[in-house]
């Protein structure tokens, strides 16, 4: 270790702050925040440090810098800014090149309302940003159906209008505009519409409804029933939009919601902005893991980044779990029941759906990366020392001990390798004894692989519970393989995963890729075993019928079946064909058995 670095480690402060790691070339490797700088930084230089990528990074550290701040939240803000400015190699970053769309209410007389990606500091109001264009478009289309807002870019100042410089255009004649350019609509009336639209964009529909109800009643009093009906239709359109976007109690107002899910390589975070019970913004992002970051660490950084991105100053944030860092003047709530709990669950569901969509895309575009991710997940969940690139699954098949077969199927990189499948006919077991059969078959399989110097699997899956698993373990111990190969059992009823010498089963998430692969291995071993059991049983029945023919033995039966394949074809064969296969004497006996004698 660099002597200067060693000295720095001994003199670190115990205050909250930010630390920065540099390599020998002065390149910034990593920026981190800590509640206690001394404890956090020294933890990286612990001999028992876990995580392959973290160890590599620590090996490159040549010097460090620290900045002391007042609170852990200040450290989080400073860390976020430094990461965005310097983009260190080992830091998690939410990379997003897109400029998001905004809805703009222009700062002008008779304001225009439109969608834009450019924010101009001219006093105009901007609402958003919207993570996707479609929600913003749907909102604008709804507004334009209800209110007649001008779309031209004329300068409608009082002076210009008074001078009579403008004439109404086609938009006025097709009833998309009420003609403010010729003062056919007053500024007060136009501004009242803009005020109602501002409320709709914010998720508050009350002013808009009051405006429309007032219009409708006025038209009705003046006996203008067609106009009243038109306003009523606009009211229905507004209520339909409100119904589709109201997802929680309308009393839940100005709240940020975060939900997340994660796997071995990435974290997926969803964000909702709630106003008056409406989701007015929704955004989901994928954050790649660089080191062995915890979900809590990544969500903390995501909250800061996303709230800055969407200019949120909500004083309440709903979360799926507690975070170590507090945000000044903001309530961090982990709801247990009720509407707030349901909205967090909805946010988590969006994060999970986004993850599934991303993984499907990766599977198509980059199947190798997809496979690597699944193998890493399986290694972690099944507590394996290595990834299970080679899996073998076993299942027994018999009916009351008759015609027993055992199937061994092979999966490589999570996919069936059918050319490597094997069928075993038990030699030392009589009757229906699944435990003894499993012990014999596993022993024969791996004894042969050892003798032939063939590669052994990293994972063995036994179809069954603790009994079948224990039998297979006996064979591995006899062969000296126990402890060198991971072996587990899978029980069908609740899909429990059993480990040797562990009475408590493991329950894996039903949507997990790991469980899906284990189920495929189990189902394929069962299918392959049943198929061969049925074939053997059928052949046994056929042989029994043919062996009843006087003077025809087992070898003659096998010869006939190898040539003609079925009893039906043997029965329909002529004398010459049978004599050619079995010789004149036995051929004649078989022919006369099926056709009788004159």
Image: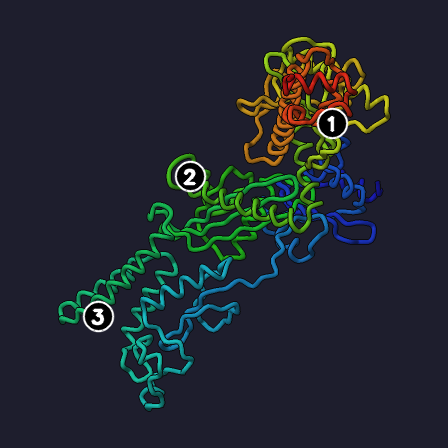
- Tag 3 or tag 2, which sits nearer the N-term? 3
Task: Name the side, left or right, on which 390 lies relative to 524.
Answer: right
Report which quarter residue 225 is drawn in. bottom left
Secondary structure beneath label 3: helix
User: Toward the viewer: 469 or 47?
Assistant: 469
Task: Name the side, left or right, on which 236 lies relative to 265.
Answer: left
Q: Is residue 469 something that shows in the picture?
A: no
Residue bearing mark 3: 227
Residue bearing mark 1: 577
Between the C-alphas of marks 2 and 3, the distance is: 44 Å
Residue bearing mark 2: 341
x, y (%) of residue 522? 63, 27
Between the C-alphas of marks 3 and 1, the distance is: 95 Å
Please tell me how many numbered marks the rendered image carries.
Answer: 3
Between the C-alphas of marks 1 and 2, the distance is: 79 Å
| Residue lying at 72% horizontally and 14% vertically, measured from the top left | 552
User: Toward the viewer: 555 or 139?
Assistant: 555
Other residues around mark 1 within 10 Å, as few (<14) / some (14–19) / many (≥20) = some
x, y (%) of residue 194? 34, 68
Q: Is residue 539 above or below residue 149?
A: above
Mark nearer the viewer, 2 or 3: 3
Q: Is residue 174 something that shows in the picture?
A: yes
User: Toward the viewer: 118 or 352?
Assistant: 352
Mark nearer the viewer, 3 or 1: 1
Secondary structure beneath label 1: helix
- Cβ atoms under marks 2 and 3 closer than 8 Å: no
């Amino acid at each position: 270790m660099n002597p200067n670095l060693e000295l720095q480690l001994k003199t670190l402060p115990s205050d909250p702050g930010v630390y920065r790691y540099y390599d020998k070339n002065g390149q910034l490797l990593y920026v981190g925040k800590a509640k206690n700088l001394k404890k956090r930084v020294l933890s990286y230089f612990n001999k028992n440090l876990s995580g392959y990528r973290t160890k590599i990074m620590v090996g490159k550290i040549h010097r460090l810098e620290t900045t002391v701040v007042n609170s852990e939240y200040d450290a989080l803000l400073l860390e976020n800014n430094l990461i965005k400015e310097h983009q260190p190699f080992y830091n998690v970053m939410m990379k997003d090149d897109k400029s998001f769309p905004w809805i703009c209410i222009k700062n002008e007389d008779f304001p225009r309302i439109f969608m834009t990606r450019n924010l101009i500091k001219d006093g105009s109001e901007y609402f958003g940003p919207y993570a996707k264009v479609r929600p913003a478009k749907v909102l604008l289309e709804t507004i334009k159906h209800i209110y007649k807002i001008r779309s031209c870019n004329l300068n409608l100042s009082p002076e210009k209008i008074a001078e009579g410089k403008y004439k109404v255009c086609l938009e006025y004649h097709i009833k998309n505009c009420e003609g403010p350019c010729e003062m056919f609509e007053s500024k007060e009336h136009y501004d009242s519409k803009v005020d109602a639209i501002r409320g709709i964009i914010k998720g508050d529909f009350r002013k808009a409804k009051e405006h429309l109800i007032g219009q409708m009643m006025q038209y009705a009093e003046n006996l203008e029933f067609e106009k009243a009906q038109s306003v009523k239709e606009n009211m229905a359109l507004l209520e339909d939009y409100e119904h589709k976007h109201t997802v929680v109690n309308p009393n839940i107002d100005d709240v940020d919601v975060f939900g997340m899910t994660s796997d071995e390589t990435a974290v997926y975070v969803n964000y909702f902005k709630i106003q008056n019970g409406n989701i007015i913004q929704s955004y989901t992002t994928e954050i790649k893991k660089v080191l062995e970051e915890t979900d809590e660490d990544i969500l903390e950084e995501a909250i800061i980044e996303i709230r800055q991105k969407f200019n949120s100053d909500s004083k309440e944030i709903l979360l799926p779990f507690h975070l170590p860092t507090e945000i000044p003047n903001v309530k961090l709530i982990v709801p247990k029941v009720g509407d707030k709990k349901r909205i967090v669950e909805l946010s988590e569901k969006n994060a999970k759906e986004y993850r599934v969509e991303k993984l499907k895309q990766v599977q198509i575009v980059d199947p190798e990366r997809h496979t690597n991710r699944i193998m890493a997940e399986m290694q972690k969940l099944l507590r394996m020392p290595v990834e299970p690139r080679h899996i073998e699954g076993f299942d027994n098949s018999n009916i009351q001990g008759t015609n027993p077969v055992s199937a061994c199927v092979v999966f490589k990189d999570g996919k069936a390798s059918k050319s490597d499948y094997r069928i075993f006919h038990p030699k030392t077991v009589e009757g229906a004894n699944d435990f003894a059969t499993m012990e014999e078959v596993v022993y024969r399989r791996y004894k042969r692989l050892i003798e032939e110097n063939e590669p052994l699997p990293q994972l063995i899956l036994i179809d069954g519970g603790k009994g079948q698993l224990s039998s297979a373990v006996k064979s591995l111990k006899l062969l000296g393989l126990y402890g060198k190969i991971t072996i587990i059992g899978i029980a069908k009823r609740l899909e429990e995963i059993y480990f040797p010498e562990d009475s408590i089963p493991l329950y894996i998430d039903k949507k997990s890729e790991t469980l899906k692969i284990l189920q495929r291995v189990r189902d394929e071993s069962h299918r392959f075993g049943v198929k061969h059991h049925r074939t053997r049983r059928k052949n046994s029945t056929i042989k029994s019928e043919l062996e009843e023919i006087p003077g025809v033995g087992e070898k003659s039966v096998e010869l006939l079946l190898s040539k003609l394949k079925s009893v039906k074809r043997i029965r329909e064969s002529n004398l010459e064909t049978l004599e050619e296969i079995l010789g004149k004497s036995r051929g004649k006996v078989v022919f006369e058995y099926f056709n009788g004698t004159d």
